[in-house]
């Protein structure tokens, strides 16, 4: 029996189709230190090809393109692809899922996924990456993680989480299990970067409203979430949102055998 065709998680398929305006307004980019680290460790530059899984609106791609690398984005959500095309006009973009990459064997030199790998079937995605990447290529997984040692940030999370339901989260670390099972990839090694995103109260609210399962709420529910977040935020015209940007690197073994 052939394996079930992969599908996009309903929260991502529906939520991110609705969330693009808030996503563009509220989501931070990534710190320069983390971007330089990725460019160096993934050996990105002219003549190199990097596959990005789930690039969304292109928040990370925009920062990698100046290295001269060719980005090939794999994005299943229509609205996200339209935003990516606006934001990363020099990037290639394919409407597909990480578990079935419409790319030929050995075509790419590196891969990244930012704020995304927890959405995928990890084992199937890693097998596909092992097929399309050259041996000893490096995969970089990136997440901006809110620093909940800050009390108001913790309070904001307390507003968000009751709505999560079964939606996947990077914090659960369930995504890591695929690497423990895969023979093709080394165990991911984490490097962390402190990141303070200076923004505005409106953009912090947009950041919360851009979360997939929050974007799917009714108008009244979303308005209630926005109101509660505004009550939590520090006063002032600007807000410093503390993050820790985690970068996990895994190398494709030169002896990997692809089934």
Image (cartoon, rainbow, N blue to C red):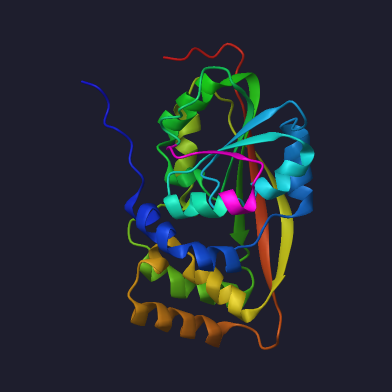
Total marks shown come to 0
Q: Which picture quadrant has residue 221?
A: bottom left
Q: Is residue 39 left or right of residue 10?
A: right
Pinpoint residue 77: horizontal percent, then vertical percent: 43, 49
Does the magenta segment cover residue 69?
Answer: no
- Taking the spot 73% from the left edge, 65% from the top edge, the residue there is 196
- Nearest the eye: 222 or 45: 45
Vertical side of 173 occupied by 106: above or below: above
Pinpoint residue 25: horizontal percent, then vertical percent: 59, 68
Vertical side of 134 occupied by 161: above or below: below
Magenta residues span 85-97
On-image quarter of the C terminus: top left
Q: Is residue 237 left or right of residue 172?
A: right
**Residue found farthest to the left:** 1
Is any atom of residue 57 visible in this view?
no
Pinpoint residue 190: horizontal percent, then vertical percent: 65, 41
- Taking the spot 55% from the left edge, 46% from the top edge, the residue there is 55
On-image quarter of the N terminus: top left
- Taking the spot 62% from the left edge, 56% from the top edge, the residue there is 144
Does the magenta segment cover residue 91?
Answer: yes
Pinpoint residue 10: horizontal percent, then vertical percent: 32, 53
Q: Is residue 222 left or right of residue 82?
A: left
Vertical side of 239 occupied by 35: above or below: above
- Nearest the eye: 2 or 253: 2
Is any atom of residue 126 visible in this view?
yes
């Amino acid at each position: 029996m052939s394996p079930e065709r992969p599908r996009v998680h309903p929260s991502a398929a529906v939520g991110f189709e609705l969330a693009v305006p808030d996503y563009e307004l509220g989501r931070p980019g990534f710190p320069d230190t983390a971007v330089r680290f990725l460019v160096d460790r993934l050996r990105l530059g002219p003549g190199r090809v990097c596959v990005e899984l789930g690039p969304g609106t292109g928040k990370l791609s925009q920062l990698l393109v100046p290295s001269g690398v060719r980005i090939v984005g794999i994005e299943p959500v229509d609205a996200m692809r339209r935003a990516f095309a606006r934001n990363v006009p020099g990037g290639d973009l394919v409407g597909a899922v990480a578990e079935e990459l419409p790319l030929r064997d050995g075509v790419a030199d590196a891969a990244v996924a930012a704020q995304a790998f927890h959405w995928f079937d990890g084992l199937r995605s890693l097998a596909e990456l092992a097929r399309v990447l050259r041996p000893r290529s490096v995969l970089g997984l990136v997440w901006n993680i809110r620093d909940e040692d800050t009390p108001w940030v913790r309070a904001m999370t307390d507003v968000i989480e009751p709505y999560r339901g079964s939606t996947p989260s990077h914090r659960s670390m369930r995504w890591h299990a695929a690497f423990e099972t895969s023979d093709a990839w080394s165990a991911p090694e984490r490097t962390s970067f402190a990141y303070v995103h200076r923004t505005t109260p409106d953009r912090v609210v947009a950041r919360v409203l851009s979360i997939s399962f929050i974007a799917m709420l009714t108008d009244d529910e979303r308005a209630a979430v926005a109101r509660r977040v505004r009550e939590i935020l520090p006063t002032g015209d600007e807000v410093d949102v503390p993050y820790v940007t985690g970068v996990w690197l895994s190398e494709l073994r030169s002896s990997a055998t692809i089934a």
